[in-house]
Every structure is written in C-alpha cells, then in structure tokens.
Amino acid sequence: MRTSRLEDLLREAAPQVLGAVVRRYGDFDTCEDAVQEALLAAAQQWPAEGVPENPKSWLITVAARRRIELLRSETARRRREDAVVHEPPPAAATNVDDSLPLLFLCCHPALTPSSQVALTLRAVGGLSTAEIARALLVPEATVGQRISRAKQKIRDSGARFTMPPEAERAERLNAVLKVLYLIFNEGYTASSGLSLHRIELSAEAIRLARELRARLSEDGEVAGLLALMLLTDARRPARTRPDGGLVPLAAQDRGRWDAAAIAEGTALITDTLASAPIGPYQLQAAIAAVHGEAADAAGTDWPQILQLYGFLRALAPGPMVTLNRIVAVAMVDGPSAALVELDQAAREPALAGHYRVAAVRAHLLEMVGDPGAAREQYRLAARQTLSAPEQRYLESRALALRP
C-alpha cells in the first residue's frame, strides 16, 4: 500500500477507534495514548504484513491491549487494572460513529483555545504530535505538553464521552466551530513563518467541517462555516506568486480560483440563508460569495458587502470585522471617510499595535494620494507582522511608493 494511502486510512480510522475505546473504558487520556501507539504499530507493520481485513477492529484490539499495558505500568491504578484486565476489547460497531462526541470532548470549555486546537488535531484529525508541531510551527515538546495538560484537565473536570446536555450544546458547538475556524485560518494565512499557507491545516479543517455538517445538517452556522472555508480556500491558488510572494485580492488572477469550490460554497450558503437563522459564519460566507461571484475586482458589489458587514458588526463585532468593514467603506464612500473611521477604530485595545491597522491605513493613504505617509505605514506594518510573505509584500508596497 502506498504511504499516502496508508496515512489517509489511519487518519480516517483514528477518531473512530479512539471513540470506540473511550466509549468502552471512559478514561480519555490513557485511551488516547493507547490509540496513538496502535496507529504507530499499524504504520510499522501493515506495509510489510498487509492491511488486515478489518483495519478498524485490528486497531481497536491493539489499542485495548495497549491500554491494559499502560495501566499495568502504573502502580496507583493497579486496582482498576485488576477489574478490567480480563474484559474483552470493545466491539468494532460499524454503525456507531463517535466523531461528533469526540469533537465536543476535545473542545471542552475547561481547555484553552490552543489546547483545544492541539487536541482536536491529534484525536479527531489523527495527526501525530510531530505533524501538529510542524503545522503550528511550535516545538514538538510544546505540543506534547499542551495535549498532556488538555487530557489531564478533561480527566479532572469529570467530562464524560457523551454529547453535552441540550442546555450546553449550543455553547459547546460554538467552541467547536471556533476551533475549526482557528485551524483553518492558521492554515490559510499562517500567523508566522516563511510560508503564507499551511495547506495541511486548512485541508484538515475543511474535512472536519464536512464531517460536522454531515452530522448536523440542519444547523445553519455549521453550513455557514463550511461554505466560508470553501469560498475562502478557493482563492488560495492565486494568493501567491511562484516565488511565494503575496498577491492581494484585487490583483489576483481569478481564472486560477477553484471554480468548483466557489460553486459548492455559494450553493451551500444560498440554501442555508434561506432556511436557517442567520449567524456570523453565514454572513462571512455571504461576503466571500459576493467576492467569488465577481468576474474581476472592478465588478465587486461593494455596497452589498458593506451592508453585510453592517449586519455582521451588529451580530458579532470584532477587530477584524471592524477593519474589513472599513475597507468596504473606502470602496463605497471613499478613502477619506474610511480614514476617519480607522482613526476611531485604532483606539480599541484589541487593535492597538496590530499590523493590519497600519496596513489598512497605508492602503487608504495611497488611495487619497499621500504616498509619503502611505510608505511609512507600509514599513510600520512590515515591522509588526511575523509572517515573512506578508512582510515582503508590505515592504514591496513601500518601495513602489518611493518619491
């Protein structure tokens, strides 16, 4: 079996195996370690011995045995081991899908957002600690510590492997959506490092959003998030030059956009807006759809985008919503009006010192015909960002405005 096919198989099986073992035994932390070792054993044995007839059953059996070995090595848990050592492995029930309760468990409110992201990528996404570390550009030891602390907090909180009660489900779902969007955004526009994209992260977020959509097909915000990811990721092929340099939206070759993803995302958000209560992810997806429908930058329906940002600001205000709306104001009411709003927004603590404030101000100053001031703001933004591609782009904009 090709390595890529084996990796796909193991990644797909990981949450199902973990769900089955946790559902049977309950102790998430030990079960998760056991499943990771079962996956490692499969990766080492299957290429030489062949994939077993029922890979999921094989993994569950090995994980269950490994769990007993892990418990046996801990003296403090010897009494629990004596009670379970003769228990048969959990059945590989093919009609039970544990991905959704597992995703909710990984996004438990007792965890920090960074721990939720790491644990979700590990337990639900099936990524190894090393893969997560490479994707997030943090040391492998840091990821390991985050995952270890997350499992400890889940155990200490007494959380159980079940869907949360109805009264908590909406709040927990919001956390799940936020985590998936954090993963996607870190993959689509990396916050630091030499590369603008970390494709494995954005692809994993889209895959998990599809899984969530399949299980919660009536939820408008789940559909909205998936549509937003598809419509945004569709522009990825045109966002960089061959040398890795950033290409802004207005200058992108729209012929390189993924037409199939745009069509899927547009259809999804159109249907959702007509049938579900409107939420923030749906509004963001609608904005992305307006951009996706324009044949070129000049054909963008900016008045509609400005109106949608007005709805979004009222429903879910935030610093990036504020900045993006100001760009829309510039396109509808002119850059001078936008600069006034930007000066007010820059006083907000969440935007103080953020490189995007300087980048937007530079763009607006360039629009009003003040290249000297725009050049200084581009340079300021370049100093403030940690992303090498964005830094190069901002520096190139400053150089292009030389007197």
Image (tube, helix red, strand yellow):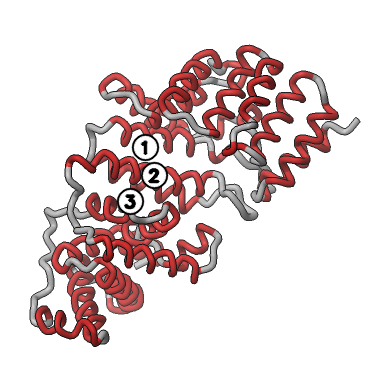
> With 196 as the anchor, is 108 left or right in this view?
left
Examine the image and state in which quarter residue 281 appears.
Answer: top left
The answer to whether residue 364 is above or below residue 63 is above
Mark 3 Cα-neighbour bin, 10 Å: few <14, some 14–19, many ≥20: some
Q: Would residue 344 be visible to someone looking at this image? A: yes
* Contact between labelled residues 2 and 1, with CB atoms less than 8 Å apart: yes
Question: Would you name the residue on which mark 3 appears?
Answer: 109
Question: Would you name the residue on which mark 2 appears?
Answer: 206
Q: Which of marks 1 and 2 is nearer the N terminus?
A: 2
Q: Which of 363 and 9 is in front in this view?
A: 363
From the image, which quarter does the C terminus lie in? top right
Residue that appears at 23% across and 74% down: 63
* Contact between labelled residues 1 and 3, with CB atoms less than 8 Å apart: no
From the image, which quarter does the N terminus lie in? bottom left
> With 159 as the anchor, is 95 left or right in this view?
left
Q: Would residue 285 be visible to someone looking at this image? A: no
Measured Cα–Cα span from mark 3 to mark 2: 22 Å
Residue that appears at 71% across and 16% down: 336
Helix, strand or loop at label 3? It is: loop
Q: What residue type is labelled 1?
A: Leu
Q: How many marks?
A: 3
Residue that appears at 50% across and 48% down: 187
Q: Which of marks 3 and 1 is nearer the N terminus?
A: 3
Q: Which amino acid does label 3 sit on?
A: Pro
Query: Residue 275's x, y, as percent?
Result: 26, 22
> With 51 as the anchor, is 95 left or right in this view?
left
Question: Would you name the residue on which mark 1 appears?
Answer: 226
Query: Residue 298's x, y, as percent?
Result: 62, 17
